[in-house]
Structure formats: structure tokens, C-alpha cells
Image (cartoon, grey):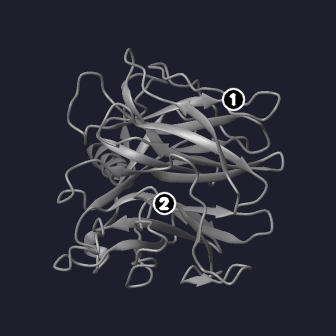
Amino acid sequence: MKASLLIAALLAGSLTAHAQKMPTPRPGGNPIFPGWYADPEAAIFNRQYWIYPTYSAPYAEQVHLDAFSSPDLVHWAKHPRILDTASVKWAHRAMWAPAIVAKGGKYYLFFGANDYHPEKPNEPPGGIGVAVADNPAGPFKDYLGHPLVGTIENGAQPIDQFVFQDKDGKYYLVYGGWQHCNIARLKDDFTGFLPLPDGTVFKEITPDKYVEGPLMFRRQGKYYFMWSEGGWTGPDYSVAYAVGTSPFGPFQRVGKIMAQDPTVGTGAGHHSVINVPGTDRWYIVYHRHPLGDKDGNHRQVCIEEMHFDDKGLIQPVKLTTEGVAAQPLGR
């Protein structure tokens, strides 16, 4: 009997070592899991919801990425240190704002590193990198050995990347800080870029008041381009969007759909969206600051439902402490 109990305990320990169950602050509530995290990237893999956030800490400590998975948007499992700077030789600090795509049985994780500033020649180079794994929980390893984007193009700092797949199967990298946003067509193996129809590689698609955190999706034939405005450490951080007829725009700003609520949380921004397959049910996953907390790195990941009106415009999103009800994925 004692031997059986010991074996059972060892098996349980081995299962939790890879995916540590994390109690939510309260079932279905916001934030959806504990800890300081920001810039969440949301995806669906193998009938599971996944979130890949920035570990929100000072740059010198922000040297790894965790992931979280859930069967229903309410109960979350933590997958620690799916990638860190030990696996990326050129990255030394400030690993942040991941984006992920599954292709050909592999998972490609795009990330920013080193907080690249070309006016500081004594600092190591940085930019947008790519890591690869056989499993959405990693471990991820550096794919290229160097940044995919490590230069300033059209004034855009190489950070806050998002990978968009168009209806024709082509993949695009949409990225940029410093109030500039570029789009570039990725090669099929994600090792570089292909020229766009006009012969350029990096095309600027910056809308009015854009700051950072771009995201793009299609719904009912329209292209929705979303981004964050304001300062990421302050209460005025927010989400706005535009609508276009192609991934290249032109994108005319429609307006904000998410901003602070001084009774719930501040600095609500840098988000991603989830569309439940086969439905028109949408969710927005974002970060915000707790009320009364002045530390800019103290950010938490939250989720709300996102709705559209009859004209296809995104309705304003209300910040809540309740979060969302369980939404299991179909089998």
C-alpha cells in the first residue's frame, strides 16, 4: 500500500511539473490568473485556450516568458519558463510581448528583446526574434540565431509584433512602437520577408493616434486593425481600432473601445482577441493596473466579452471584476 501511494504521489508530481495548476483569484473573475503579467497574446491550440503574456517586471528581470492554458477560459494551468534568454544568445533583457502561430506541426513564438534603441551604440542589438517548439507549452528554442527585425524601418521600433494570416494563407508581421506601425509579408518558413506588391518590404500602415500593440483580424469580409494608445505605465492607456478592406489599409481611426474605469482598474490596453471557432462569439484579453497601485510594472491579465453592432462596429468594452463565464471548446 505504501509503495502504491508513493508511486501515485510521484506521478502526480511529474504531471504538475510541466503544467502547474494555478487557482484563479475567484472562479471566472478578473484577473484571470495571479501574478504580474501584461501584453497577452491569445490563441487556440488542440481544443485549449492559450495565453502568452509578458512577465511584467523591470527590464533586467524580464528575461523569460510563461504561458497559461485553459479548457474553458476560467480554469488556468501555468506552463513556466517556456522561453528565456538562456535559449536566445543575442537576447539579454526585456523579453516581451510574444505572438504565436502554429504551422506544419511546429509552434513559432515571436518576441521582442533588449528594448532596442539605435542611439545607444554601447547596448547590445535587439528587436523581434523567433523561437520554435514542438508543443505550445514549449520548451522553445531560438529559431534564427539573430533578430528577424533588428533595424528601424519607417520610424517603427521593432517591438509588439503580431502575426496575421490572411484568407489566402499568406502570413504577415504587423509590428511597431514609437507611434509607427509596419506590415511585412513573412516567408513561408518565417526566416525572413518577401517583397510586397509595390516592391517594398516594410509598408507603414500607421493610423491616427497609434502608439503600439497592433493586432489584426477578419470578420465578415472586413479587416479590423486594433492598437493601444497612451502611455503603458499610466492610467490613460487604452485600445482603439480602425476598419479596412485589406491588411494594407488605408485604416481610418474609428475610436476607442476600451479605457480605464476608475472604479475597476486603470491602464487597460495591449490586448488580443479570441473568436470561438464556428461562432460569432468574441473575447478581448488585455492587461490593466490594480486600483491605487502606482508601480507601472504591476499589471494583470483580464478578459471580457467583445460585441459588434449591426454595422460591424465594435461596441465599447466595459471593464469588470467578474470576467466571463466558462466557454468550453467543442470536441
What percent of the width, then of the height, locates residue 83?
35, 65
Q: Position of residue 186 (x, y in %)?
A: 61, 77
Q: Which mark is residue 307?
A: 1
Q: Is 6 situated above or below 166?
A: above
Going by the image, does 294 lie left or right of 209? left
Give the distance between the C-alpha atoms of the residues marked 1 and 2, in whole angstroms: 28 Å
- Looking at the image, residue 233 sits to the left or right of residue 74; the answer is left
Q: Which residue is mark 2?
A: 180
- For mark 2, does the 10 Å Cα neighbourhood hold few (<14), some (14 to 19), or many (20 or more) residues? many
At x 57%, y 79%, the residue is 190
Residue 49: x percent and y percent?
57, 45
Residue kind at label 2, given as amino acid type: His
Which of 179/183 is in front? 179
SS assignment at label 2:
loop
The quarter holding residue 174 reads bottom right
Contact, mark 1 vs mark 2 (Cβ under 8 Å) = no
- The picture quadrant where one finds residue 151 is bottom left
Q: Amino acid at mark 1?
A: His
263 lies above or below 149 = above
Q: Is residue 70 visible?
A: yes
